[in-house]
Image: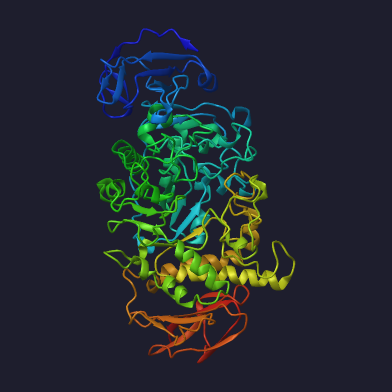
Amino acid sequence: MSETSPSFKIFPGQASPLGVSEVDKGINFAIFSQHATSVTLCLSLPQRGVHERLVGNVIELALDPHVNKTGDIWHICIEDLPRSNVLYGYRVDGPQNWNQGHRFDSNIILVDPYAKLVEGRRYFGDASLKLSKFLGTYDFDSSLFDWGDNYKLPNIPEKDLVIYEMNVRAFTADKSSGLDPKIRGSYLGVIEKIPHLLELGVNAVELLPVFEFDEFEFQRRPNPRDHMINTWGYSTINFFAPMSRYASGGGGPCNASREFKEMVKALHGAGIEVILDVVYNHTNEADDQNPYTTSFRGIDNKVYYMLDPNSGQLLNFSGCGNTLNCNHPVVMELILDSLRHWVTEYHVDGFRFDLASVLCRGTDGTPLSAPPVIRAIAKEPILSRCKIISEPWDCGGLYLVGKFPNWDRWAEWNGKYRDDMRRFIKGDSGMKGSFATRVAGSADLYSANKRKPCHSINFVIAHDGFTLYDLVSYNFKHNDANGEGGNDGSNDNFSWNCGFEGETDDPSIKALRSRQMKNFHLALMISQGTPMMLMGDEYGHTRYGNNNSYGHDTSINNFQWGFLDKQRSSHFRFFSEVIKFRLMHQVFRHENFLSNNEVTWHEDNWDNYESKFLAFTLHDSIGADIYLAFNAHNYYVKVSIPPPPSKRRWFRVADTNLASPDDFVPEGVPGIENSYNVAPYSSILLEAKLT
């Protein structure tokens, strides 16, 4: 419903900046739409409760295209609006020609793409409000956030990063977190668990999407997934607003903004960088068969999305029904403005771009060799201190691992590292050479131009796919709970269940699985490049074989703090000690690709397809060499140990076949002679120490 407009004093307003801004004459609103024929600003003032205002009681102000429009930007300034707690959106109308790509619907109040805050339901997963609307809001009343006199950015060199991929909500949502229910699953909950991150040893967190998203998007119509809640967040409503339901105690968007800054400040204070997983390849607005219009689609579908030039239908290179038109000048500027906002307003340290190959496509979907938006991100001065990481593939088959246009800045999720490591350690034949290449920094992929080993983001496990425990416990995905008949999720997992599918009490299988998890972690942390591990792998989290768990707001995704306690002196201890050992030894973190005098491969059998054993020495400039051997055979391999450097002896630091605490002894165990019997499916690490 509309209310009679109160006697606002209204001015034409200004076209810049887009969004809401405070100007001399009042509050200015500006929105882009090239193809709109009419734009109406909708306001809801703060006299009523939030939920009441989301469903009605709207003041509508029609914008006059002769007065309130400059070029393709519609604008208006209102003098006596409150400086905060106002909800706003737009009704936009225009051509109705579907085949030309237009999707205007003036019945829907749309979220401003440049809204810095978004109001919706206040509590994550509140089913009583699952059909709630979303509106923009603003706050010019709150004082500037105090970052503190002693505050500083960590500024960790890329080669020294150890990244921990995590989900803000899932990290502390479980009761086992021991936190007050009001802060479970919130930005403040992350702060409470920083001691865990420090004990583990990581120095960067990569947060699954924290832009405003609708966790109930699957429940808006009957469908096979209508029982699920989107807990990963890869379905953006707005690219500027922090997820409001990650605020503590239902605090809403203003508190979410402040608490996000408190989280970043606390992480930085602990020496931990903050990298955001950002989704600029698609939005929440789905496809043309089941559209969910909240913003871009209704404002100017033809500009914001890639369309089939013949039918006007949405192109789908994201697998989610639509594809953002990233290299259109207006959309490119939106992306850059969003990134700048997160750096200047929230002090984040970097970004991981989901399905980044989409950003390498032209407006018609054709792959580009020099995508303007990729270059602009690399050259943007405000982003110059940031880590920028691509997921170099998309759902349209554009696979760019090692070939992503990079301007010497972009790092990449190295999907070939993941696959080759999995295949070698589980015992596939013919993988020894590939394993050596990946451990050495993937020079075959990244040695061109001025790229470095750190541009390879090495990972065995990520949020999508098996957890580390499931990788060694399941041969097949078990996704029945997702409601898609097992058709979702990857079939190419390169996993091995170690002899039994799923849970078992067999002690020999359990021991083998433990050994394999340690092998994977050790290999990851001794590889040249930038390692990334997944939240929960430090205690062996299981999703019971579900390799696509995006829709489960349950223990399947939530960190189980009780399980961590059970593994603290064994599995967790090993994982933590290996990370800290990496950060103490420069031989694992070379600035440049390894030269012949920096590594010796103890191997004259490269062409033996059946060989599954690899040993090598990383040479240190002062003689503190590291010897490593990985045995993926199902039998013992007795290996000759090379002589240590002068005045040094070999000490055993790691042997994954041993039980804790002998599996990793940071100070080393002496008594290593000229040979070592490496157990089946195990690995060792020796350090040359002064005698």
Indicate whether 101 appears above or below 650: above
Which quadrant of the structure image shows residue 598? bottom left
Residue at the (41%, 31%) spot, across then down = 296
Indicate whether 361 appears above or below 537: above
Which quadrant of the structure image shows residue 633? bottom right
Give percent across and percent down for residue 485: 66, 48
Residue at the (64%, 60%) spot, across then down = 476
Residue at the (51%, 19%) spot, across then down = 53
Taking depth in this image into account, of 5 and 194 the one nearest to the observer is 5
Q: Is residue 469 left or right of residue 649?
A: right
Residue 359 appears anywhere in the view: yes
Give percent across and percent down for residue 264: 42, 46
Extreme residue toward the front, this view: 310
Q: In this view, does 61 lie to the left or right of 507?
A: left
Q: Is residue 379 left or right of residue 551?
A: left
Give percent across and percent down for residue 297: 43, 31
Residue 49 appears anywhere in the view: no
Q: Is residue 596 left or right of residue 213?
A: left
Q: Where is the C terminus found, in terms of image quarters?
A: bottom left
Give percent across and percent down for residue 290: 54, 33
Taking depth in this image into account, of 350 and 144 the one nearest to the observer is 350
Q: Which colour scheme is used?
A: rainbow
Indicate whether 570 appears above or below 28: below
Q: How many labels does the image show?
A: 0
